Amino acid sequence: MNSIYKMPSDIKRKIFRKAPIITISENSGRKYGDFSEYDITSRGYKNIIVYIQKGLSNYSVLIKNIIKPILQTQMNSGIQFSLIPLTFGIDEEPFYNGKYFSFKYRQDISKISKIISELSGDKQSNIPAIIPRLFPQVSIKNLYSGKTGIKKKNDLLIVIGRKDEFYFDESIEVDVNRFRKQIFSVEIDEDNIG
C-alpha cells in the first residue's frame, strides 16, 4: 500500500480470494412468516480480529482506510460475522477489553475505526512489540448462537503496527506459516503503509 487514503483494490481482492467458503443456515420466518430454513454459501470470514499496536491513536484516518474496504467487502458476502479488536505491545498477551462488533446488520464503520484508534491510545508500546499468539483466547456472545470461540480456519487476523517495531514471537512461527493466508499485516511508516 502506498497511501493512507486508499487501499489498492488488488490487496482487497487478494484478502477475499483467500477467504474460506462458509455455509450458514438462515431462517426466513422473520421476514416472510414461513419459517423455512435454507443454506447460504459465500466466501468470507466468521470473525475479523484486529491487533493494533499501542500508541497509534493519531492514525485514525489511516486505520479507517485500512478497515473500511475490508468490512464493506465482508458485509457484501452476507455472512454474519464479528469484529474483535485487541491491542498489543505493552501487556504480555494481546489485550481484549470486551468490545466486539456483531455484523448481522449494518454498522457505522467510521465509529468502529474511531473506537479501534482509541483502544490503541497514546501510550507508546514496547520496542520491539512482540505478538505472543496469533488467535486470542476470548469468547464472544452471539445473539443467535450463544457463545462462540475463535475458529482459526474461518478467521481473518489484521495486524496494524509501526514498521520494524512489531514481530511475531519465535514460538508461534509454525502457526504464522500455517495461517499465513489469513494474516494481513499493515506496517505504518509515517504517511505510508505497506
Image (cartoon, rainbow, N blue to C red):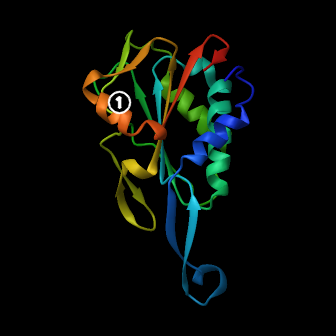
- Position in image of residue 29 (x %, y %): 58, 84
Q: Residue at x 39, y 37 (%)?
A: 97
The answer to which of 49 and 105 lies nearer the viewer is 49
Residue 1 can be seen, yes or no: yes
Residue on which the image places disc 1: 94
Residue 84 can be seen, yes or no: no
Where is residue 137, by image quadrant? top left
Q: Residue at x 40, y 42 (%)?
A: 98
The answer to which of 65 and 107 lies nearer the viewer is 65
Furthest residue to the left?
Answer: 171
Quadrant of the rendering where the N terminus is positioned:
top right
- Position in image of residue 130 (x %, y %): 34, 19
On screen, residue 28 above or below 91: below
Furthest residue to the bottom?
Answer: 34
On screen, residue 35 above or below 168: below
The answer to which of 61 and 40 lies nearer the viewer is 40
Q: Residue at x 72, y 20 (%)?
A: 3
In the rendered view, does 68 fall on the left or right side of 118? right
Give the residue type that dot 1 points to. Pro
On screen, residue 178 above or below 52: below
